[in-house]
Structures are given as C-alpha cells and as structure tokens.
Amino acid sequence: MKLNKHWLNQLPKLELHLHLEGSLEPELMFALAKRNQINLPFTSIEAVREAYEFNNLQDFLDIYYQGANVLLHEDDFYDLTWAYLEQCHAQNVIHVEPFFDPQTHTDRGVPFATVINGISRALMDGEAQLGISSELIMCFLRHLDEEAAFATLAMAEPFLDKIIAVGLDSSEDGNPPEKFSRVFAKARELGLLTVAHAGEEGPAEYVWTAIKDLQVSRIDHGVRSVEDAELIRHLAATRMPLTVCPLSNTKLCVFDDMAKHNILEMLEQGVCVTVNSDDPAYFGGYMTENFIALADGLGLQREQALKLVSNSIAASFADVDRKQAMQLLIEQFEDEH
Ligand code: ADE
Ligand code: ZN
C-alpha cells in the first residue's frame, strides 16, 4: 500500500543536510532585493522558478550563488532561517542541522558576525517558539583554496559556541576532500566535528578520502558509494551515515528518474542512510516532499520510513537526552498512527 501524504507529513522528522542559502524561496528573494535595493536578473517570481532547470551541480551552483546576493544584513539571515524553520514546523521536522556558506557572504563584504548572528538568533527562536532543536554546521567552499578555508575558520573562532561542525560543499569534481586535510585537522583541534559532501557527482574514492583524511562523522550525499562494493561493506559495518537528498539528486541529474534512486537499496544493505532536502527552494520540496517522492518513485514502505527517521536520530549531533526524546516521539507516533 502506498504511504499516505498526511502520514508522511505527520511523521516526526529530522533534517541533517540543508543549505540555508538553498532555502531562499523566490518570494523572499524578491522581498529582500526590494528591501536592500538590489537589482535581480529576473523580472518576476515566475521567471525565477522557470530558471530552475539544471543539467548538473555546477548549473545549479551558478544560480544559487547569484540568489544569495540579496542577503546583506543580520535581519536578512534571520528572516531566511526563520522561513525555513516555519516550513519545518509545518512538516513536523523536530530537529535540524543546517549548513551555511560564510564565504559566499564574506567575499561580498558581509561581516562573518552579521551572518552567524542572524542565523543563530533564528535558531534560538526556533527552539523556544517552535520546539525545533538545532545544531549549526559551517561549510567551506571547495572550489576555493585551502588558504581561504583557513581564513574562514579563523573568522569563526570567536563564535565556536554556535557551531558544532565544519563541512565541505560546492563543486565536487576536481576538488577532492584531501585538498582540505589540514584545515579539517585544525577544525578538529578546535573541538569541531566534521562532515563533507562526497560521492554526489564525484567518485566513490572521494568518500574514502573524506573518511580517512577528513575523519568525518557523516558523508553528505554519498550515493556513488554503490560503485565500490568494499566501500558499501565498510559504510554498513561502521554505520557511517549518508545524508541522502532524493529530489536534489533527480533535479541535478545524478539519477535521471526517482525509480532509479539507490537509497532503499543501500538501506537494505545496512547502510545508515537518511532523507534530506539539500536546497528545497531550488529542488521542488522540503522534507515531506522528499519522502513523498520516495513513496511515489520507489514504493517506500512504512517500516522503511520509520527506519530512515531512526537513522537520522542515530546520525544526528543532538545530545543523548534529546536523541532519546526524539526516539520516544517516533515510537509514540508509530503506536498512534
Ligand atoms: N551547495 C549547495 N547545495 C549543494 C550540493 N548539492 N552539492 C554541493 N554543494 C552544494
Ligand atoms: Zn548539499
């Protein structure tokens, strides 16, 4: 039986792979452009949505970095984060670990403090007013060099109480994880956890080097791991989580059809896969829509959906008490629905 959309919306969920800049809806983009007197290269909200046709990751990144230009002031980062949290609340997402890309903003002259203070204030309000717990992850842009990543880490040092981990995103091919071995080592010395995008467009080899050289706690995407049977066995044996993003993968042509997505195949192989939305404003959906896409395209079953959420709890950076409370919420939901 096909899973009901209402059931999927009510299912308590966690999101571990979400770029805040990728949650910028065209409506907010236009409102911020007006507030900040910035000219957009689009004539209407509809024209923005029509431009969201991508053949690959780079096609998307070009338009994504352009969209972020409307973010200038602390309140802009607050409004962006708050809008995302409202979406989470409407979809019963109870815990989030968003990414932000400081270099996209500091390279335009926006101070690091402006970015992180706006985001953190919204995350605190999200916890107090919506009951959504959160941890924040700072990503380095891998198409830029190691020196720029070190400079970004230095900017973050006064704010380390607001950041749980560093991550690695942007153009994957040709920018292997090991390019950032030294900066990730420094981040770990500072007490930060590490994650990295790997095996999205890049090869399975990048998943290995993210694990070995960057000592990550999770792999973001990792869908190309299936090309290496030994890697799949390693991921399953170590319960290394993969934060998979189904709608992102079809929008960016990593898979040409959801029916060909490998998330459930990896779940059956014992890999700790999780469901996430990546850049929901660009890819056609938030958490619930990603679960619906799996139900429609792959025939996702109730037990699999519950397992995917339990995997997210295990994979999250929440403390033990919060993890227990979230697992109880899932069990209660299972009993009642
Ligand atoms: N930045 C935002 N979304 C991304 C993705 N899917 N891959 C790499 N970098 C990103
Ligand atoms: Zn991503």
Image: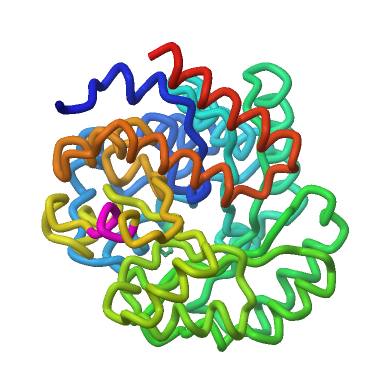
Q: Nearer the viewer, residue 191 or 122?
A: 191
* Nearest the eye: 79 or 257: 257
- Quadrant for ligand 2 reads bottom left
Above or below, comparing residue 334 to residue 167 in the picture: above
Return the x and y of residue 226 as percentages of the image width and height: 29, 73
Residue 107 in view: no
Q: Hey, which quadrant is residue 95 in on the image?
A: top right
The image quarter in which residue 55 lies: bottom left
Q: Furthest residue to the top? A: 336
Specify whether residue 122 is painted magenta: no
Seen at 48% across and 26% down, the residue is 12
> Quick one: quadrant of the C terminus?
top left
Q: Please, which residue is most extreme toward the right here?
A: 158
Give residue 53's position: percent from left, percent from top: 18, 53
Which quarter of the figure is the N terminus placed in? top left
The colour mode here is rainbow
Q: Position of residue 102 (x, y in %)?
A: 63, 59
Tell me where the magenta segment starts and ends, as one range: 262-266
Q: From the viewer's perspective, is 151 left or right of 48?
A: right
Is residue 87 visible in the rendered image? The answer is yes
Q: Position of residue 67 (x, y in %)?
A: 41, 49
For image coordinates 12% across by 60% down, the residue present is: 256
Left or right: 143 with respect to 51? right
